[in-house]
Image: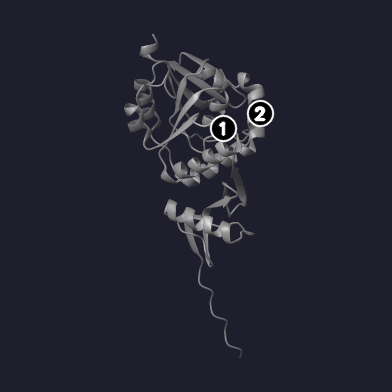
């Protein structure tokens, strides 16, 4: 009888890992290795896989869920900026934040989409991100956006840390604090929005306590707190002052005591 083939060792499965792209050259592989070391994450090698991969590519990065082959590229471009600014006045988030070059704190920055949109609409942004991996990735994305001309230097200031703590230390206090607590995405949400939310949940897990964060935001903002909600969900806190609805989400505005 022929000898039995040796059993293949089971693959090592990491929750999150960094990997070079399939066609990566030496420079890209070094970038992936450096990013893994900076994030203190494993660099994917032979015989290993991960639930979520972070893949650096030409100055930006992609998130890849191998099990479903779902991929999300995180990059902000000058062309995207031009398209957004043409209709920024109709964005319910911009209307909820209020007019003028005010200072806005995005206390749940994530991958930076809302912070960048508000900066494109002329607001000065402080973006707070509690997860160190996401904060490091966002730092790289914002740097690339500045270098490409998609973002004006100094319009988005990234502050890594626990927003409930950081908010109390901000001086001067911002006019607006914006909160986007994670919530389940509905089936009729766009596929891009569902994809980003699912991959972000894989990356950071459960979000901070939304009610505790709201109280810190209300103590900090001099004019208003803006909270993003699904359009059919009850307010995070009862009795918002006003609301601005989009196609799938709603922005509830709470005027603060300092604005009275």
Name the one closer to the observer, 12 or 76: 76
The numbered dot on residue 206 is none
Name the one closer to the observer, 33 or 27: 27
Q: On the image, numbered disc 2 is attached to which residue? A: 82
Q: Please name the colour scheme applied to the rendered image.
A: one colour
Name the one closer to the observer, 66 or 91: 91
- Give me the residue at 38% from left, 24% from top: 217
**Category of crowding for the residue at label 1, using alpha-carbon neighbours closer than 10 angstroms: few (below 14), some (14–19), many (at least 20):** many
Name the one closer to the observer, 59 or 191: 59
Residue 115 rendering spot, x and y as whole percentages: 51, 30
Tell me: residue 243, above or below residue 132: above
- Looking at this view, name the residue that lies furthest to the bottom: 1
Q: On the image, numbered disc 1 is attached to which residue? A: 151
Is the N terminus in the top left, top right, bottom left or bottom right quadrant? bottom right
- Label 2 close to label 1 by CB (< 8 Å): no
- Give me the residue at 39% from left, 16% from top: 222
Residue 158 rendering spot, x and y as whole percentages: 44, 35
Residue 108 rendering spot, x and y as whole percentages: 45, 33
Whole-Å distance between the Cαs marked 2 and 1? Answer: 11 Å
- Give me the residue at 61% from left, 48% from top: 71
Tell me the element at label 1: loop
Tell me: residue 178, above or below residue 131: above
Tell me the element at label 2: helix
Please say whether residue 16 is visible from this viewpoint.
no
Is the C terminus in the top left, top right, bottom left or bottom right quadrant? top left
**Category of crowding for the residue at label 2, using alpha-carbon neighbours closer than 10 angstroms: few (below 14), some (14–19), many (at least 20):** few
Residue 118 rendering spot, x and y as whole percentages: 54, 26
Q: Earlier in the sequence, mark 2 or mark 1?
A: 2
Tell me: residue 232, above or below residue 64: above
Where residue 210 sits, quadrant-wise, is top left
């Amino acid at each position: 009888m022929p000898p039995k083939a040796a059993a293949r060792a089971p693959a090592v499965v990491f929750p999150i890992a960094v990997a070079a792209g399939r066609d990566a050259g030496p420079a890209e592989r070094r970038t992936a290795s450096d990013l893994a070391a900076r994030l203190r994450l494993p660099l994917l090698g032979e015989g290993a896989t991960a639930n979520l991969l972070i893949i650096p590519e030409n100055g930006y990065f992609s998130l890849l869920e191998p099990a479903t082959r779902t991929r999300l590229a995180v990059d902000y471009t000058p062309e995207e900026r031009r398209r957004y600014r043409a209709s920024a006045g109709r964005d319910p988030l911009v209307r909820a934040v209020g007019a003028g070059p005010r200072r806005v704190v995005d206390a749940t920055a994530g991958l930076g989409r809302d912070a960048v949109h508000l900066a494109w609409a002329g607001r000065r942004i402080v973006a707070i991100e509690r997860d160190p991996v996401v904060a490091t990735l966002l730092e790289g994305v914002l740097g690339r956006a500045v270098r490409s001309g998609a973002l004006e230097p100094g319009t988005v200031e990234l502050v890594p840390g626990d927003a409930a703590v950081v908010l109390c230390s901000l001086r001067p206090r911002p006019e607006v604090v914006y909160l986007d607590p994670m919530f389940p995405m509905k089936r009729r949400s766009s596929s891009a929005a569902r994809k980003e939310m699912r991959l972000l949940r894989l990356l950071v897990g459960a979000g901070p306590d939304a009610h505790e964060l709201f109280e810190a935001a209300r103590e900090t903002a001099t004019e208003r707190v803006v909270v993003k909600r699904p359009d059919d969900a009850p307010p995070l806190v009862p009795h918002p002052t006003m609301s601005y609805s989009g196609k799938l989400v709603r922005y509830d505005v709470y005027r603060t005591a300092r604005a009275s």
